[in-house]
Image (spheres, helix red, strand yellow):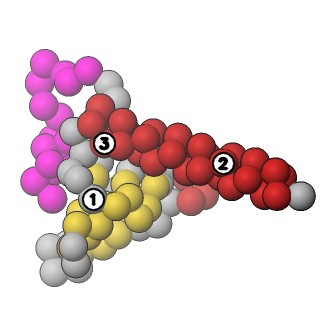
Amino acid sequence: MIYWFLFIALLFFIIWYVLRHSAKALQNETNMPAGEIVYKGISVKDAKMLSAPRYFIRGYPDYVIKQDENYIPVEIKSAAPPKKLYSSVRMQLIA
């Protein structure tokens, strides 16, 4: 009986370690800020709109990172940068 418990505990530890390492690798690969990933806008149905009425902007972030008491929205661009910066991309960067 104790062997099953040890086996299951080891299995959970391995899963935890792999998931934690994957999250750290993602942060290093994408130059995301350090911190805890508290939101992933992976699909349209999961997306939550953020808004800042004071600045008249709103949008769907790819990730939200928590650093201490601050929340940082992160937008990931997967395509190569264009030769000319589009106005929509410029506005995302400014926001």
Identify the residue at image location x=69%, y=55%: 9
Other-residue count near label 3 (Cα within 10 Å), few / some / many at <14 / 14–19 / ≥20: some
Label 3, label 1: how far apart the Cα atoms are? 9 Å
Q: Residues within 10 Å of mark 2 (few under 14, many from 20)?
A: few
In magenta segment, residue 94: yes
Residue 81, quarter of picture:
top left
> Label 1 vs label 2: CA separation?
26 Å
- The residue indicated by pointer 1 is 35
41 or 36, which is in the foreground? 36
| Label 1: few (<14), some (14–19) or many (≥20) C-alpha neighbours in 10 Å | some
Please name the residue shown 59% across and 50% down the image.
Answer: 13
Q: For mark 3, what is the residue?
A: 27
Q: Nearer the viewer, residue 39 or 43?
A: 39
Q: Write the start and end of the magenta stretch as one range.
A: 80-95
Quick check: can you spot residue 11?
Answer: yes
Viewer-closest of 22 and 84: 22
Q: Residue at x 29, y 32 (%)?
A: 29
